[in-house]
Image (cartoon, coloured by chain):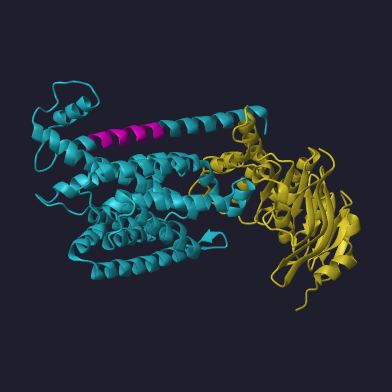
Chain colours: A cyan, B yellow
Amino acid sequence: MTGTDIGTRASAHTVAAHALRRRRALVYLITALLLVLGIVLSAGLGQLAIGPAEVVGSLLRAIGIPNSWAPTDQLIEQTLWQIRFPRVVMSLLVGALLAVAGAVMQAIFANPLAEPGVVGVSSGAAVGAAVAITLGLTALGSWSVAVCAFAGGLVATLVVYSTARAQGRTETVTLILTGIAVNAFTGAGLALLMFVGDSSSREQIVFWQLGSMNGSRWPEVVIVLVVGALASAVTFALARQYDLLALGDRTASHLGVRVERLRVISIVLVALLTGVAVAFVGIISFVGLVVPHIVRMLLGPSNRTLLLASLLGGATMLVYADLLARTVIPSADLPIGILTSLVGGPFFYWLIRRNRRRAGGWG
Amino acid sequence: MTGTAFALRGVGYRIGATTILDDVSLEIPYGRVLALVGPNGAGKSSLLSLLTGDARASAGEILLGGRPLRQWTARDLSRTRAVLLQANHVAFSFTALDVVEMGRAPWIGDEGDADERAIADAMARTDVVHLAARAYPSLSGGEKARVSLARVLAQDTAIVMLDEPTAALDLRHQEDVLRIARELAGEGRAVVVVLHDLSLAAAYADDVAIISHGRLVAYGAPAEVLTEERIEDVYGTPVRVIPDPDTGRPIVLPRRSLSR
């Protein structure tokens, strides 16, 4: 092959890379627009309808831009800032964190079906949270439930990791079976805690299992924001190494990745992301499965793109899911976990079918 | 680069009570192609994983550049040696170009256009330029092997280790791979290649090491090492060794009788 030949081929690659960059920018832009639209809609719709102009006006005033759109009615202002906004921000944060947690799990297991809900990390975290509620643990103040949820999630992740990995590989069947076992066990744990708990903690545990953004408050939102932002930032820094894991553990290590250390750090990150998300809103399944899959279909598997796009996409998805949950049945608040499972279940099924046709299943 | 890449002194490797390798001493110099041959289960791949640092020797010592292998950091190792394993599975549909680019990971942060040149050069040498945009999992076995080899070449290291790189390849690409191995040695790199085809080893390697039952049975020039007697002894099957009419290198043929 001659020099010019290599040159033209290289420029062909540059063209392809350029097309991918444009596509990526477009996907980011559209997702961001959808997210902003979703935020405005979700803040406006509800028993007290608030116009988009008033929502935007109130937001602008809050950041110090006086404007004529801002609502003058105190009731509207209170509804927005005490009920709607914390809820909207909580749903976008939880969606973002769960999607990132899913992408990270898929990277460290080198398996597209790894997801916090499917393999039982979410329910492990829910058991942790339920223990804190039932036993009335408040040693750490408003962080108590979050810390217990993190611990539960971490234990579940460690169990799944140590069981499902053998000789540096994760067999899908083992992974899913482990998930079934963990979910069965945590289900029993939750049931037991409901049995021994009083009626108010029982109610709270049921709420955990179904997942809901209802009653989100600012102090909780801040906890999710702080922990989530830190954990997500670390995953972004590790993105290149996650790519190399796709080559298998040995090859990744030949390329300079300290594989075991990377996995241990990532497991803690997944437990943090899932635990803090689950601690306040309960189990919301399939976000971590559906969002990264759609992103991979649109933009390819590179983790630098995948993590950021999943963050945005997860946020967008849950803002709309929560909007639906609040409005689909008049004057009733449908648990959001029901909605995501309604969409995620069939999606999961479709993934299995598609993969069987293409590659003879995961084996 | 001249001198010694690896020096092995009395290296042994045990898993539980099973001895995989026993008392292997060997010097692997820069600028030469060393072929590791031997029957199935003889310990060739184990020896390779000791050299790559994947496994740890249970006896003896392995020096790389005069320094015990254990003392090397993962990053320094990744800039010194590249490894092609037998199985090269890639999870998720990265393109062939993505996979080759991953070979540049050890060099991230370095200035200049070395990345682009190394990638283009590696893909041209392994004849995979036309596969660049294809999804790796959709490639044939031979194409995967060549893309993976391109990834190893893109890593641009002084030591290149290949574990049965020809297993999935057709005749032409087999010859291509070993020709590339010779070129790499010609550039001063140390090349270690595990092979099953003795004739292929004899044709392209500067040195051949025969491993049998975990021991180094013979090490030297192909014509000295690959004798009928020794091969029959090690493999337990009769062979005929004849010189290649073109190169004079030995060709190893199993003796066959066609009985009805």
- A58 vs A101, nearest the viewer: A58
Name the residue at 79% across, 56% down.
B61
Name the residue at 8% across, 30% down.
A73
User: Is residue A29 located in the magenta-colored stretch of the structure?
Assistant: yes
Residue A117 position, x and y percent, is 35, 57
Examine the rendered structure and indicate whether residue B102 appears above or below residue B168: above
Q: Quadrant of residue A344?
A: bottom left
Q: Which residues are magenta?
A: A23-38
The answer to whether residue B29 is left or right of residue A104 is: right
- Magenta stretch, main secondary structure, is helix
Residue A9 position, x and y percent, is 58, 32
Name the residue at 48% across, 48% down.
B93
User: Is residue B36 located in the magenta-colored stretch of the structure?
Assistant: no
Q: Quadrant of residue B150?
A: top right
> Which quarter of the image is occupied by the C terminus of chain B?
bottom right
> Which quarter of the image is occupied by the N terminus of chain B?
top right
Residue A87 position, x and y percent, is 22, 43
Q: Quadrant of residue A285?
A: bottom left
Examine the rendered structure and indicate whether residue A133 appears above or below residue A229: below
Q: Is residue B140 visible?
A: no
